[in-house]
Image (cartoon, grey):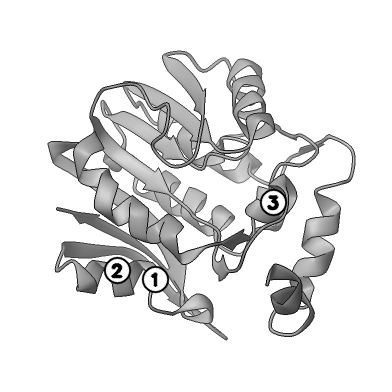
Amino acid sequence: MSEEINNKAYPEVDSLIKETDEPDYITHAFADIGIPSLIILRSVFRVDNSFLGGYLARTLHASNELAKRKSVLDLGCGCGLQGLVCALHGAKSVHFSDINQSAAKNSRLNSILLDVNNVSFSTGDLFANIPPRKFDLIIFNPPSITGTPSNDSEAAFFREDRVVEDFFKLFPGYLRREGVVIMPGSSKFEGDTSPMSMIRRYNLGYEMVSREEDDTTKYVVLFKP
């Protein structure tokens, strides 16, 4: 299924997937938001080439009060960019989790590189293996394209619909009473399981933290049960 989408609907994704097979490297793409260097390991999503990842990070940087003194869960953390932005803006603690073991390792390396403390890590699908606790802020930037990934590299780009559906069913169990969830989205990937579609399905209150329009509309939305 993912191969069909690669070749027809989103041909540019093929080259992005191939890039994840390239050697480890260091990017300086986020120096403007206080992260001078970021390690990207092989098989981990290249957030410096991401359509929504960099946009989300810069939104978190601009809205820095969202994370201040908060316990944060960076779910699907990749190299750790989103959680690191929160940590550098005064988060009380950050837990990084990803289904890809290399991503959890990558987040740990970047935490050491940036001398970020009060962090913890786990590996698992969605909330599997998350410590039994609740968070003030959950950040989730799921793969945008519906499909069936065949390996860790493809899992950074393709997701089965059940991934987002399960997230919306499960996240209230991991969120404090006054906590919030932040997700990015785009009209480029609108569908039945896009963030806004799911928010409407569950009749959740939400606030649009950021919205930009060019060829497509990008947004970052905040919501809670």
- Where on the picture, by quarter, is residue 38? top right
**Residue type at tag 2:** Met
* Mark 2 vs 1: CB contact within 8 A: yes
Q: Using the image as rendered, state which of residue 26 and residue 6 is in the foreground.
A: 6
Q: Residue at x 81, y 67 (%)?
A: 14
* Mark 3 vs 2: CB contact within 8 A: no
Looking at marks 2 and 1 on the same chain, the residue that comes earlier in the sequence is marked by 1
Would residue 195 be seen by someone viewing this image from the given angle?
Answer: yes
**Residue type at tag 3:** Asp
Distance of label 3 from label 1 (alpha carbons): 25 Å
Looking at marks 3 and 1 on the same chain, the residue that comes earlier in the sequence is marked by 3
Task: Name the residue that disc number 3 marks.
Answer: 48
Would residue 36 be seen by someone viewing this image from the given angle?
Answer: no
Distance of label 3 from label 2 (alpha carbons): 27 Å
Which mark is nearer the camera, 3 or 2? Answer: 2
Seen in the image, is 37 located left or right of residue 164? right
Seen in the image, is 164 located left or right of residue 153? left
Q: Where's the N terminus, which quadrant?
A: bottom right
In the displayed structure, would residue 128 be above or below residue 56? Answer: above
Label for residue 213?
A: none
Label for residue 198?
A: 2
Please tell me whether mark 2 sits on a helix, a strand or a loop.
helix
Looking at marks 3 and 2 on the same chain, the residue that comes earlier in the sequence is marked by 3
- Where on the picture, by quarter, is residue 43? top right
Seen in the image, is 221 located left or right of residue 164? left
Task: Name the residue that disc number 1 marks.
Answer: 193
Seen in the image, is 219 located left or right of residue 160? left
Distance of label 2 from label 1 (alpha carbons): 6 Å
Please tell me whether mark 1 sits on a helix, a strand or a loop.
loop
Give the x, y percent position of residue 58.
49, 51
Q: Using the image as rendered, state which of residue 193 and residue 177 is in the foreground.
A: 193
Give the x, y percent position of residue 79.
63, 36
